Amino acid sequence: MIDAELAAYGAGLDERPQIVVLNKVDLGASPSFSLRDERIVQVVALSCATGEGVDELKRALFRLCPPRPEPVEGDELAAQGLVDFLVYRPRSRRRQPFRIYRTDRGFRVVGEVPDDEELAEALAQAGARSDSLVEIAGRKEKL
């Protein structure tokens, strides 16, 4: 069934080398698997619950990886010194000089009040609507 799916996907996936993974070996008898197929390069028995066989599976997968290509002279990416991968980090959560609190009648802004555009965006993120009552520095106004 898996071979049929791979063939239906195309791109020669049904002809690629395969590793058969037999899971749940921690539950009892040692599994036996015999299938004569030149694509199957290894059969690995493992247990996801105990971790048995995971290292063997990792080694088998790395053996199937193609070697890293050598850089070609004149390669633009290598010449630019671009990295092989990107690292994404979350933005810093710098404290705003103001806070928005939800009240029983609307919202209250406390602290250093930002400009109108930043305040409108912060209130929208807090859930304020155009008809919400907003208290800023003791005065109440509609959005």
Image (tube, grey):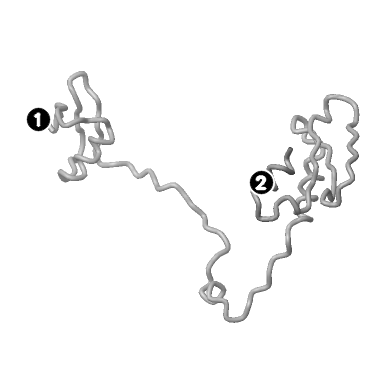
- Which residue, given by chain and number where applicable, does mark 1 sit on? 141
Query: Residue sitting at 14 percent across and 28 percent down?
Result: 131
Q: Quadrant of residue 137?
A: top left
For marks 1 and 2, give the CA distance.
62 Å
Q: Nearer the viewer, residue 17 or 65?
A: 17
Dividing the image into 4 quarters, which one contains the C terminus? top left
Secondary element at tag 1: strand
**Which amino acid, mark 2?**
Ala
Left or right position of 115 against 102 = left
**Which amino acid, mark 1?**
Glu
Q: Whole-percent x and y of residue 82?
A: 53, 68
Q: How many marks?
A: 2
Q: Whole-percent x and y of residue 39?
A: 82, 51
Q: Is 123 located above or below residue 79 in the figure?
A: above
Dividing the image into 4 quarters, which one contains the N terminus? top right
Residue closest to the far top: 104
Residue closest to the far bottom: 74
Q: Quick one: label 1, few (<14), some, or many (20+) residues within 10 Å?
A: few
Q: Whole-percent x and y of residue 129?
A: 20, 30
Q: Nearer the viewer, residue 26 or 3?
A: 3
- In primary-sequence order, the first of circles 1 and 2 is 2
Left or right position of 135 against 38 = left
Q: Nearer the viewer, residue 86 or 69?
A: 69
Q: Are marks 1 and 2 in contact (CB under 8 Å)?
A: no
Secondary element at tag 2: helix
Q: Whole-percent x and y of residue 12?
A: 70, 55
Query: Residue sitting at 40 percent across and 48 percent down?
Result: 91
Query: Residue sitting at 90 percent across and 27 percent down?
Result: 29
Q: Quadrant of residue 104?
A: top left
* Camera-nearest label, 1 or 2: 2
- Which residue, given by chain and number where applicable, does mark 2 sit on? 8
